[in-house]
Amino acid sequence: MPDQSNFLCPSCQLPLKETRTAHGFFWSCETCGGRAVTIELLRRTFTPECINPLWLHALRGEGTRGRPCPECRKPMLAVTLSTNAPVDVDVCQHCHFVWFDAGEADALKPRPMPPAEPELPQKARELLAMEEIKRIADEARGSDFDSEPPDEWWKYIAGFFGMPVEYDAPAQERQPWITWLLAAAMVAASLFGLPHLGEIVEQFSLIPAQETRLHGLTFATSFFLHAGLIHLIGYTYFLLVFGDNVEDFLGRFRYLGLIAVAAFVGDLAHIAADPQSQTPCVGASGGIAGVIVFYALEFPRVRLGFLMRWGLIWLRWIRFPAWFALVLWILFQLIGAWEQKAGISSVSAFAHLGGAVVGFVMWLVWRTKNDEARTSNVEEMTKSE
């Protein structure tokens, strides 16, 4: 940009004052009201029909030499502004300046303003703001393979023992009472049976070769019993971490139905894998698997953190999206199913896979219904704005 202190009015020979506009700068004389404007600014401000003929006349030299240019002081060319406006303006072919005396620019036609974008409804603006906040928070936490540690202290303990932790858990609108009650019942039943675990398991566990004993009641009782504290803590943790969000999404009755059907189908899959087995089976395998699959499918972008360590040396936190963790989990279950069939595993991977199928099917059904409900709500909110 040239030094504006050198810009002089062609008529008054006084310094021009710089003025800023939305499209750029021009220089005006406070005495006579004239102004010097670059051809580039004119093209951004006024229609081509006004400016192109003016510049074409100047390029062809169709005019008479007259007053000096405000910048280079060479004689400018006086040309006709347009056929519709018989006004002569001064143009400097070297500096691309056009000099307008007071009132001459009024004959130019401004470019039409672009149409204003329709304003988003308040709810949509809030959602966009929340997504931006989430994006900023993700950036602050670092990359997925060298993440910042979680904020809550208890997640360090869970991560130390190999448990996944939520980095950005979905917001909840209600308390997960069913999840809490089921977890409490599992803990109470398992702790009650620990002193006499062998007898309790023998009486209330699910045995594939005796699936109808106690009139089929063992399909339910085996859900609440566990083979030890580690077994109990693991399933209770997964239920509490993932079940609360699934319950909040589905509602209490549908959530309870998901767990019940997933547990039942998981037990059937376990029986089908070895119908003649006399080995007792306890644990909430199928029900928890259904919850895990539903969670990962409904909240696929939630980041799950894992603490990578060697012995007691803490290395780093890494994060995976829930959908990727689900893929890994399914691969492990397929390997576990092969080991179960080969008789080298005491974990019922078939129960996990049976519950996972139920979680997938129910997600397909209830996802569609909730999408329709959300679409209807958005349409109503849009109409009310």
Image (tube, rainbow, N blue to C red):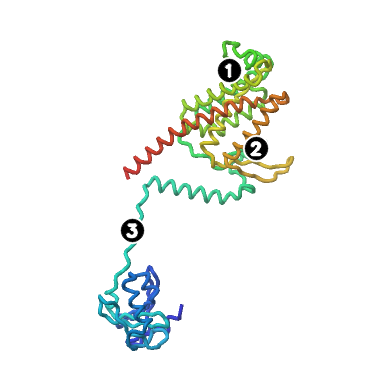
Quarter occupied by residue 43: bottom left
| Helix, strand or loop status at disc 3 | loop
Dot 1 surroundings within 10 Å: few (below 14), some, or many (20 or more)? Answer: many
Instruction: Tell which circle, 1 or 2, labels the residue nearer the N-terminal end.
Output: 2
Tag 2, which secondary structure?
helix
Location of the C terminus by quadrant is top left
* Number of disc labels: 3
Res 115 label: 3
Specify the farthest residue to the right: 311
Q: CA distance from mark 3 to mark 1?
A: 65 Å
Q: Is residue 9 visible?
A: no
**Where residue 363 sits: x, y (%)?**
50, 32
Amino acid carrying mark 1 in the image: Phe
Q: Gap in Å between the C-alphas at discs 1 and 2?
A: 33 Å
Q: Are marks 2 and 3 in contact (CB under 8 Å)?
A: no
Question: Which of the numbered marks, if any, corresponds to residue 257?
Answer: none
In this orientation, does residue 302 appear? yes
Looking at the image, which is closer to me, 364 or 195? 364
Q: Give the amino acid type for the residue marked by disc 2 in the picture.
A: Ile
Seen in the picture, residue 25 relative to 310 is either above or below; the reply is below
Dividing the picture into quadrants, the one containing residue 331 is top right
Callout 3 crowding tier (Cα within 10 Å): few <14, some 14–19, many ≥20:
few
Mark 1–mark 2 CB contact (< 8 Å): no
Image-based side of 247 in relation to 275, left or right: left
Q: Nearer the viewer, residue 110 or 260?
A: 110
What residue sits right under mark 2 in the picture?
A: 157
Q: Residue flagged by tag 3: what amino acid is it?
A: Pro
Marker disc for residue 219: 1
